[in-house]
Image: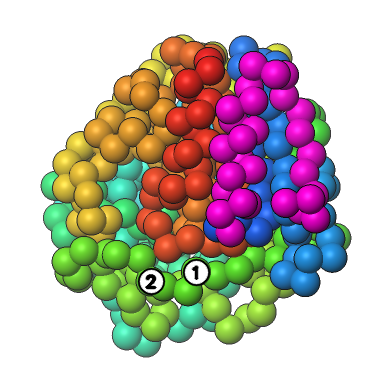
Amino acid sequence: MSDIPFSVLADGQYAEVVDAFRNNFEEGIEHGASFCVFQDGEKIIDLKGGWANKAKTEAISDHHLFSIFSSGKAVAAIIIAHLADQDLLGYDQPVSSFWPELRAVQQCDLTVAQLMSHQAGLSGVTNPEWTPEDWFDWKKTIAELSSQNPIFEPGSASGYSPVTFGFLAGEVARRMDEFGRHLGEILRQDICEPHSIDVWIGLPESEHGRCVEMQKPKRLADLGEINAATKAAFLEKWSSPGRRGVAAWRSAQLAGSNCHATAEGLALLMQVFNDGSIDGEMYLSEDVREKLTASRILGPDQVLPFDVNFAAGIMRNHPNYFYGPNPNTVGHSGWGGSCVFADPDAGVSAAYVMTRQDNSLMGDPRSLRIIEALYEVL
């Protein structure tokens, strides 16, 4: 272990958390990672370990950005809530009132909250002419989703939308923001830049040199019984953006799948779920937070192989408890193992990011070990 670089900011009372973090490296299941926790606005834990590149020549440091994939959906949820707090949209507002051409809303009176909780029936694109490159064209993607027949009846169930979620939420934001901005622009201009928060949706080329090298999992995730919604979401040759190179992927506004961030930036941002504030500035009223985190649908998901309790863009902890023992905790996980969560009962917000991706859809054993240790000492 002596040759693995570590950076530890944590009082002695959190020794078990530090040990859990280190143990992932000792067991050879970690290559580079970071874990950060805020409690009541104060940073109490900030851990970094391992390497930013495969060659093990560059240690993880404060300036490195991690690809967090679907953990970025929590960030998108915050931006939609920010717009709701400004009375620019409402969670119970019919999507048809501002996006009437979206065919999914023509079949039922689909609300913003239902769209944000994966109930639109658009878990993926079903057009066999679609290509991985097409995702990089925002207007083309929105036109495709607008004209597509839902895969299942909207409002009848949730069907996790790994890539399309970012476009659905992003188009809601673009149409309802008073300046017509995309999610990434709202995030940077309204929240991150004023507070020097290192979280990005659509990464400028000037920041690409800070990105860690991600190592893809060697095995596919267990998707359970395959159906049309699962196939569209994950298994078609066009299900994910591609063929344009990593630079184009990092730069694109794919809010559901390509957010880049530090663990500290994410943990700081996630505080807003607990008390409405970010770094001391109030962003969300109690009423908006209640609507943001309220359970919108609970039950078997059409895409993920387990029951899911979706709020408006974020997952509630019950019934899976991936984010500690408290049922009021909300969080989200990303492909390969990253996760973010906020626990209003404990006043805690946290983020785990890593370079070596596991094949767990959610509940990565590395983060579970660390989070369990955290709650042993809180």
Residue 115 relative to residue 178: left or right: left
Q: Which residues are magenta?
A: 1-28
Q: Is residue 55 left or right of residue 228?
A: right
Answer yes or no: is residue 292 visible: no
**Residue 18 on the magenta segment:** yes
Query: Circle 1: is it few (<14), some (14-19), or many (20+) Cα within 10 Å?
Result: some
Residue 4 lies, in percent from the top left, at: 76, 53
Residue in the foreground of this view, choosing between 94 and 306: 306
Residue 267 appears in which quarter of the rendering?
top right
| x and y, in percent, of residue 364 in the image | 44, 49
233 inside magenta stretch: no
Q: Amino acid at mark 2?
A: Leu
Q: In which image quadrant can residue 368 be found?
A: top left
Q: Give the Cα distance between marks 1 and 2.
A: 7 Å
Q: Residue furthest front?
A: 2
- Residue drawn at x 76%, y 33% as measured from the top left: 8
Residue 68: image x %, image y %? 58, 53
Name the residue tied to disc 2: 220
- For label 1, the residue is 217
